Amino acid sequence: MSRTAADQYDRLGFLCNGFDYENQAWVVKGHYQRCGHPEEMGCRCFGRLHEGETVHEHAQPSDEELLAVLDHSAALWCGRI
């Protein structure tokens, strides 16, 4: 049986709960989770190296995403929304 995508994202499109396929690590409540490898394995998995760090700390939004956020902010400031 394969996993069906049930990833959850916040209003800005950042992963809140699910699997970060780019970094190959699980995310719970916006924080990276430690991998399940045994300690003696000494792995260098993203989850082990960045356990507890937020997804936002590692996000690299595209130019289009940044422009969309800036445009939305400008619209709010100018009263268009």
Image: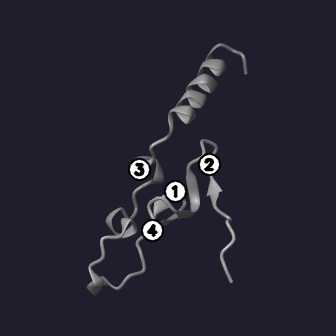
Q: What is the number of the mark on residue 8?
A: none
Mark 1, Cα crowd under 10 Å, few <14 / some 14-19 / many 20+, is many
Which of the marked residues, 1 or 2, is nearer the chain's N terminus? 2
Which of the marked residues, 3 or 4, is nearer the chain's N terminus? 4
- Mark 3 touches mark 4? (CB < 8 Å): no
- Mark 3 touches mark 1? (CB < 8 Å): no
Q: Secondary structure at mark 2?
A: loop
Per the image, the residue denoted by label 3 is: 58
Q: Quadrant of residue 38?
A: bottom left
Per the image, the residue denoted by label 2 is: 10
- Mark 1 touches mark 2? (CB < 8 Å): yes
Which of the marked residues, 2 or 4, is nearer the chain's N terminus? 2
Mark 4, Cα crowd under 10 Å, few <14 / some 14-19 / many 20+, is many
Identify the residue at image location x=62%, y=52%: 9
Mark 2, Cα crowd under 10 Å, few <14 / some 14-19 / many 20+, is few
Which of the marked residues, 3 or 1, is nearer the chain's N terminus? 1
30 over 1 or under it: above or below: above
Q: Is residue 70 left or right of residue 5?
A: left
Mark 3 residue type: His
Per the image, the residue denoted by label 4 is: 33
